[in-house]
Image: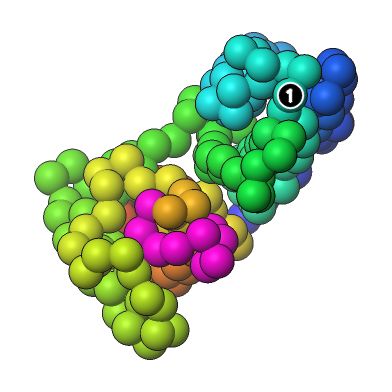
């Protein structure tokens, strides 16, 4: 079976006083409209993270750095994270915000967490049980007893895993940093969407 090749991605940097943010730019001559759609979504998310940092309100007194990581680029899918770190001058420490974005590369469609599963599948309950088990196994001290993920929980995909993650302070103290919970795609066979990304990554 032939799979689509990885798509070319080039780094672009946004530079302003006290701000340097690297942004991935998709360059795909075979699917220019899809590339434009993905780039628009990525740039919109990066702008939202910069706004969240507070830079636009006080650019002289806050330092901002941003970067991205490619988590998956194969079989017709692209999954990545974009992150922004802000450090207000005289603050005890900075703050980092991170978002995951997953796309169908031939269409540029943004894949959301519910899209991974069959319509009506109890994916929130299933994934929450996996997260709860890992919290216990890894002895993570949560701020409150963990009950459930959000239906739109942050995530990205790797070659054989769905990785859920939580923002700083979302479920645990700052010292834990971002908490990542990888779940094997093979653990999700019963609820995965037919012919979806989990299907495609399962073999």
Q: In this view of the protein, can residue 200 be seen by the observer?
A: no
On the image, which quarter does residue 191 sit in? bottom left
The residue nearer to you, when weighing 151 against 119, is 151
**Location of residue 186 in the rendering, given as x and y in whole percent from the top left corner:** 40, 72
**Location of residue 23 in the rendering, given as x and y in whole percent from the top left corner:** 76, 29
Image height check: is 203 above or below 198? Answer: below
Residue at 61% from the left image edge and 13% from the top image edge = 57
Segment colored magenta: 170-178
Residue 104 is left or right of residue 15, and the answer is left
Q: Which residue is mark 1?
A: 61
Q: Residues within 10 Å of mark 1 (few under 14, many from 20)?
A: few
Image height check: is 153 above or below 141? Answer: above
On the image, which quarter does residue 108 sit in? top right
The answer to whether residue 177 is magenta is yes
Residue at 64% from the left image edge and 49% from the top image edge = 92
The answer to whether residue 11 is magenta is no
Label 1 element class: loop
Residue at 27% from the left image edge and 47% from the top image edge = 150
């Amino acid at each position: 079976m032939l799979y689509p090749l990885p798509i070319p991605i080039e780094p672009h940097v946004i530079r302003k006083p006290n701000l340097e943010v690297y942004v991935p730019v998709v360059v795909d001559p075979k699917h220019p409209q899809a590339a434009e759609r993905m780039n628009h979504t990525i740039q919109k998310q990066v702008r939202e993270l910069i706004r969240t940092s507070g830079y636009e309100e006080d650019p002289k007194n806050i330092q901002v750095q941003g970067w991205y990581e490619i988590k998956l680029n194969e079989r017709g899918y692209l999954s990545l994270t974009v992150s922004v770190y802000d450090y207000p001058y005289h603050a005890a420490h900075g703050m980092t915000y991170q978002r995951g974005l997953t796309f169908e590369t031939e269409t540029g469609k943004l894949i959301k967490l519910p899209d991974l599963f069959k319509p009506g599948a109890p994916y929130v309950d299933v994934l929450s049980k996996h997260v709860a088990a890992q919290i216990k196994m890894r002895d993570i001290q949560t701020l409150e007893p963990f009950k459930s993920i959000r239906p739109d929980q942050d995530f990205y995909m790797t070659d054989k895993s769905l990785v859920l993650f939580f923002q700083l302070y979302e479920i645990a103290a700052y010292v834990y940093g971002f908490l990542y919970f990888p779940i094997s795609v093979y653990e999700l066979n019963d609820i995965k969407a037919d012919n979806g990304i989990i299907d495609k990554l399962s073999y």
